[in-house]
Image (tube, rainbow, N blue to C red):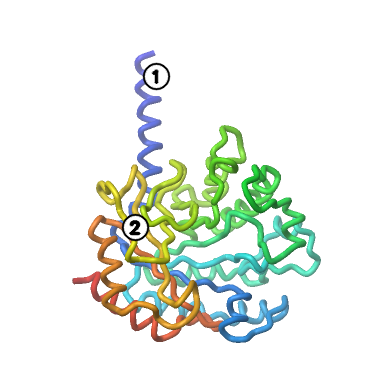
Amino acid sequence: MKKVCVIIILFISSALTDAQDRAAWMQTAKFGVMTHYLPDWLKQTEKLNIDVKKWNELVDHFDVDGLADQVKSVGANYMIFTIGQNSGFYVSPNKTYDRIVGISLTKCSRRDLIADLADAMHKRGLKFMVYLPSGAPNGDSVAKKALQWQNGAHPNKEFQSNWEQIIREWSVRWGNKVDGWWFDGCYWPNVMYRGESAPNFKSFAAAARAGNPNSAIGFNMGVMYRITSGTPYEDYIAGEINKDDQLSINKPYDGKIDGVQIHVLSFLGEKWGMGNPRFTTAQVIGYSQKLWDVKGSMTWDAPIQSNGHIYQPFIDQLTEVGKALKK
C-alpha cells in the first residue's frame, strides 16, 4: 500500500509540474507580437468588401514568410494570430464547424493559414500561438443559432459542447505546430466554466490540448488592471489591458501570480488593430520593462495589412522594444 501511495503522489506531482511548465518558455521569450487579421477590420482599414471568394483570395496570397521575417527582425520571440472572431470567417478549414453550422458556402478558408504560419514561425525559431473567442461569431446570425449560443450569463452547455468539438479538430490537425491558445471573452466563468461536470474549464482546456498536450492556454475574462489568474486550468494570465499606465502586478513570485505565468496583452495603435501609434517608443519600452522586471511576458498587438505585413511605424516601435530586451 505504501508503495502504491508513493507512486500516486509522484504521478500527481509530475502532472502539476507539467501543467506549470507549459508556459515556462514565456519567461525567457519575454516579448511577442499579435495581429488581428479579420475581414470586418480590413473593411475599416482598407475599405475592402469581403465575401467568401475575396476572403479566400486574401488568405491564399497572405505572405507568411514576410510576416515571419518581420516578427523575427524586431526581436520578438513569439506571435499570437487570430483564427477568426465575430464575422464568422476563419483562416483555416474546419469540417466540424461546417457540419454544425450547416452553411453550404463555408466561411472557413480553403488554405490552412495557421499551419503555414506556424511552419514559417518555427523555421525562424519563434513560438506560435492562436487566438479564438470563447463564444460564437456575433456577426453571423446563422452560425450563432446553429451553434446554440446565448450571449450573456448562461450556462451554454450545448454551445460549449459544439465549440469544444470544433477546437479539438483544429488542435488535432495542427498538433505541435501550435504552442498555445489565447481564448477571448470568458466573461461569465462562474456560470459557464467552473462547474464540476463537463463542459467546463477542464474540458475546454483538454479540447485545446488534444493535439499538443504541452500547449499553453490563457482564458481572458476581460480587461483587468490588477492582473490575476481565473482558473488553475490555464498556464498563463491572458492579461488584456488598454490603459497600460494603470497596470498593477500584485504579489509576483518567480514570474508567476498564484502559480500562473505572468503575461500582459495590449495594443500599439489608437485601438485594437487600427490607427496610428498611440504611445511614444519610450513608453512602449517602459511598459514592457515592467513585465520583464517580474519575469513576465509582454505581447503587443500591431495593425496588419491584407497582404500579411505589419505597418512600418509599428515595426519601428517593435524594433526598439527588441533592442531594449537585449540590453
State the residue in front, 9 or 74.
74
Secondary structure, mark 1, is helix
| Crowdedness near tag 1: few (<14), some (14–19) or many (≥20) residues, C-alpha within 10 Å | few
- What is the spatial separation of the Cα atoms under label 1 and label 2, in whole angstroms? 36 Å
| Crowdedness near tag 2: few (<14), some (14–19) or many (≥20) residues, C-alpha within 10 Å | many
Q: Residue at x 52, y 56 (%)?
A: 183
Please indicate whether residue 165 sits to the left or right of residue 18 in the image. right
Badge nearest the viewer, 1 or 2: 2
Residue 121 sits above or below residue 53 on the image: above
Query: In the rendering, which numbered label is found on residue 303?
Result: none
State the residue in front, 298 or 129.
298
Residue 69 at x, y percent in the picture: 41, 79
Residue 11 sits above or below residue 34 on the image: above
Quarter of the picture containing the C terminus is bottom left
The residue identified by callout 1 is 4
Residue 168 at x, y percent in the picture: 61, 51
**Of the residues shown, which amino acid type is indicated by label 2?**
Met
**Of the residues shown, which amino acid type is indicated by label 1?**
Val
Q: Residue at x 29, y 74 (%)?
A: 283
Question: What is the residue that sits farthest to the left in this orientation?
Answer: 327
Secondary structure, mark 2, is helix
The residue identified by callout 2 is 26
